[in-house]
Amino acid sequence: MTTVETIHDVPVLVCPPEGDRIRGEREALDLIGDAGYRGARWVAVPAERFDEAFFRLSTRVAGDIVQKFVQYRTGLAVVGDISRHTAGSAALRDFVRECNRGRQTWFVADTDELRERLKG
C-alpha cells in the first residue's frame, strides 16, 4: 500500500515493491498526481517497479519520466540495487551519477540512504 511518510520534515510518497510497473509518462503522472493530492514533495519508488526499458537510456523512458517529475517540481527517488543495469552501461552509470549530484532525482540503495540525503 502506498503511504506518505515524513522524513526530516519532507513528506514522501512511499510506493511498495508490489504494484503496477512504471512504463512511462502516464504512470509517472499518476504518481505525481497522487503525491500532490497527498501533499508529498518526493516519491520513493522501488527500482523493481520500473520497466526494463527505464534502465536502457536509448529508449528515452528514464529521461521522459525524470522530466515529468522536474516539470511538476516533485522529487523522485529510485530505491534499490540497480547494479545489474549499471554494470553493462556506462551511459546509465553517468546518468545515475549526474542525477545524484542534483536535488530532484536520486538513485539510492535503500530508505536509509534516502533518509540521509533528505537531511539537508
Image (cartoon, helix red, strand yellow):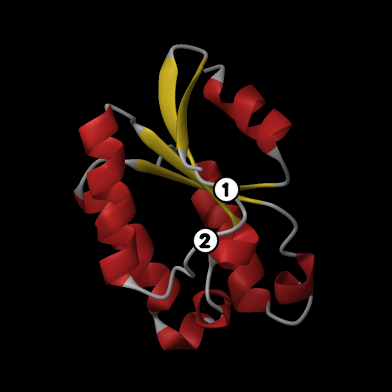
The amino acid pointed to by label 1 is Pro
Q: Nearer the viewer, residue 93 or 112?
A: 112
Task: Kindly state the secondary structure of the residue where label 2 is placed.
Answer: loop
Residue that lies at the very extreme toward the bottom in this rendered image: 58
Position of residue 33 in the picture relative to residue 11 (left or right): left
Is there a contact, CB below 8 Å, between mark 2 and mark 1?
yes
Q: Nearer the viewer, residue 105 or 22?
A: 22
- Residue 19 is tagged as 2
Total numbered badges shown on the rendered structure: 2
Count residues near mark 2 (Cα–Cα under 10 Å), then give few for <14, some for 14-19, many for 20+: few
- Residue 66 is tagged as none
Position of residue 69 in the picture relative to residue 118 (left or right): left
Residue 12, horizontal then vertical, whole percent: 44, 30
Q: Nearer the viewer, residue 70 or 42?
A: 42
Position of residue 87 in the picture relative to residue 120 (left or right): right
Q: Is residue 96 above or below residue 14?
A: below
Q: Is residue 107 above or below residue 39?
A: below
The amino acid pointed to by label 2 is Gly
Q: In this view, does 72 lie above or below 89?
A: above
Task: Kindly state the secondary structure of the residue where label 1 is placed.
Answer: loop
**Which residue is tagged 1?**
16
